[in-house]
Amino acid sequence: MMGIFPDGNLQKLNALLANLQRSNILGAVEVLQCRIGLLQTSTLDHVEFQLQGLLVKMSELDTFRSALDEPSVTGEVEALRAVLERLEWVVQAVPGIVHRLVVQASEHDHALRFGQQLHGMEAAQQSRAGTLRDNVALLLEMEQSLKENVASVQTNFASLEARVTQLGQ
């Protein structure tokens, strides 16, 4: 109803009806002004435009109604209804399938994160194994060097004792 009376003309119409109950000259003048406002060309054009739109919609509805009454369309509608009835189990199964897919996606994400963590741990283990090999090689090197140094110190002590005994005689 609001679309038929633009620019507040509905309010003017309400004022007109309220003024009819008052019986004075000013009220009658206001009533006439409201009526004149309703007959302005812009208001009439707007109402005509709305009526034309309504007429177009009504003719479209008539076209659709006549198309629905045709036997071929009715047959197609019945065929579609039969197909939908046969596929009712699909409609009922879809929520369960979607739920399972969501759960599987969650599990897949969890497994992916676990795989990434496992890969990170394997990389850390390989790094530590390499460091351990390097440390073992360094330890063997130091052990060999220590043996050589101990042998050198023993040789030096032996030669020192030999000198001391030589000097002591």
Image (cartoon, grey):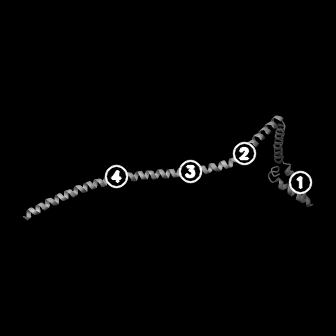
The numbered disc on residue 7 is none
* Marker disc for residue 89: 2
SS type, badge 4 = helix
- In front of the other: label 2 or label 1? 2
Residue on which disc 1 sits: 32
Residue density around tag 3, few if under 14, some if 14–19, many if 20 or more, within 10 Å? few
The amino acid pointed to by label 2 is Trp
At numbered mark 1, what does the secondary structure look like: helix, strand or loop? helix
Q: Is residue 130 left or right of residue 20?
A: left
Q: Position of residue 39 (x, y in %)?
A: 86, 49
Which residue is the site of mark 4? 134
Residue 6 in percent (x, y) is at 80, 51
Q: Residues within 10 Å of mark 4 (few under 14, many from 20)?
A: few
Q: Amino acid at mark 3?
A: Asp
Q: Which residue is mark 3?
A: 109
Front: mark 2 or 4: 2
**Does label 3 or label 1 sit earlier along the sequence?**
1
Q: Is residue 42 left or right of residue 164?
A: right
Looking at the image, residue 76 sits to the left or right of residue 105; the answer is right
Residue closer to the observer: 120 or 147: 147
Mark 3 and mark 1 residues within 8 Å of each other at the beta carbon: no
Q: Position of residue 13 (x, y in %)?
A: 86, 54
The CA distance from mark 4 to mark 1 is 108 Å
Lower position in the chain sequence, tag 2 or tag 4: 2
